Amino acid sequence: MKPGRILAVLLLGGLLAGLAPPLPAEPLSDFQEERKAMIRDIAGHWRSLGSRLEAGPDAQVLGAMANTPRHLFVPDHLRKRAYEDRPLPIGHGQTISQPFIVALMTQLLETGPDDVVLEVGTGSGYQAAVLSPLVAEVYTIEIIPQLAEQARRRLERLHLENVQVRTGDGYYGWEEHAPFDAVVVTAAADHVPPPLVRQLKPGGRMVIPVGSPFTVQQLMLVEKHEDGSVTNRQLLPVAFVPLTGKH
């Protein structure tokens, strides 16, 4: 389906009923016009990048984006800006990613309803919340204890029972629940972490920003093939906070 047609369907559908299971109704009662504007912005970015991306925006992913109350994942004083297509600070030197980038990374994973996903860099919990209605399980790791606890409580309040949050160094993954159908890393590493590649299933995908802080980073698509071989592909320049830890 072409991006323009998808967008028309979304806007006619109000809050996108039927595209992805909605979160509790109360948070969705606010910012309805802002949500619609966010979806228009995401579709516009996709059109502007054209052939650099694999396909136009997926309706299921856009439905999850529109049904996730982003204003509950930012500090109170930034709620009026929650649906702007830009990153916002969440404290501890971290950010909640730009909505277009969240949608793009989610779609690139090519997940299905039975998949198990690892996220490295929980932050506010927003990326995990977007993934929640699209997959079976989300395991997410955050190295900053305060952010991990805040995200855990926020996700529990939204009754996202298929998301588990752990405090730790995400560079090393989450071995107990491996292998994963997909891995998404929401902080920039200077290389693709080998433990995450090992924990990725054959046939799985990883999306990760790679590069040094304060330089141009590249959003990378890592594909692990059925024979165990791995290919990497650069997609577009991005700017993420660095992946921290003892590695």
Image (cartoon, grey):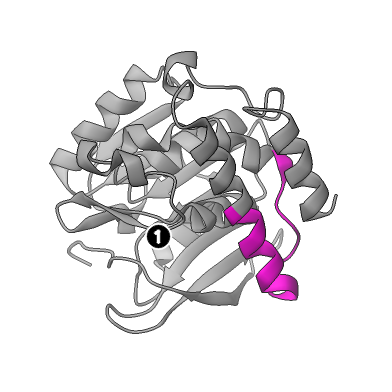
- Whether 53 is drawn above or below 114: the answer is below
Residue 189 is inside the magenta segment = no
Q: Secondary structure at mark 1?
A: helix
Residue under the image location 77 percent in, 54 percent down = 3
166 left or right of 25?
left
Which residue has dot 1 on it?
195
Name the residue located 57 percent from the left edge and 29 percent from the top edge: 133
Q: Amino acid at mark 1?
A: Pro
Q: Position of residue 165 (x, y in %)?
A: 32, 34
| Residue located 41% across and 58% down the image | 86
In this rendering, is residue 103 above or below 162? below
At horizontal 54% and vertical 59% (from top left) the residue drawn is 206
Residue placed furthest toward the front: 33
Compare residues 115 and 227 and report the one nearer the observer: 115
Q: Is residue 15 left or right of residue 187?
A: right
Q: Is residue 116 left or right of residue 76?
A: right
Quarter of the image with the C terminus is bottom left
Magenta stretch: dominant SS?
Answer: helix
Q: Is residue 51 magenta?
A: yes
Location of residue 210 in the rendering, given as x and y in whole percent from the top left corner:
42, 74
* Residue 211 location, quadrant: bottom left
Q: Quadrant of residue 77?
A: top left
For the residue pair 238 and 131, the one nearer the viewer reads as 238
Q: Is residue 23 above or below residue 188?
A: above
| Image position, residue 136 (x, y; %) | 57, 28
How would you rate the neighbour count of disc 1 (Cα within 10 Å): few for under 14, some for 14-19, many for 20 or more? Answer: some
Residues 21 and 10: in front is 10
Name the spot of residue 238 as percent of width and height, x first.
Answer: 45, 72
**Span of residues in magenta:** 41-59
Can you name the residue that lies furthest to the right here? 1
The reply to whether residue 201 is in sight is no
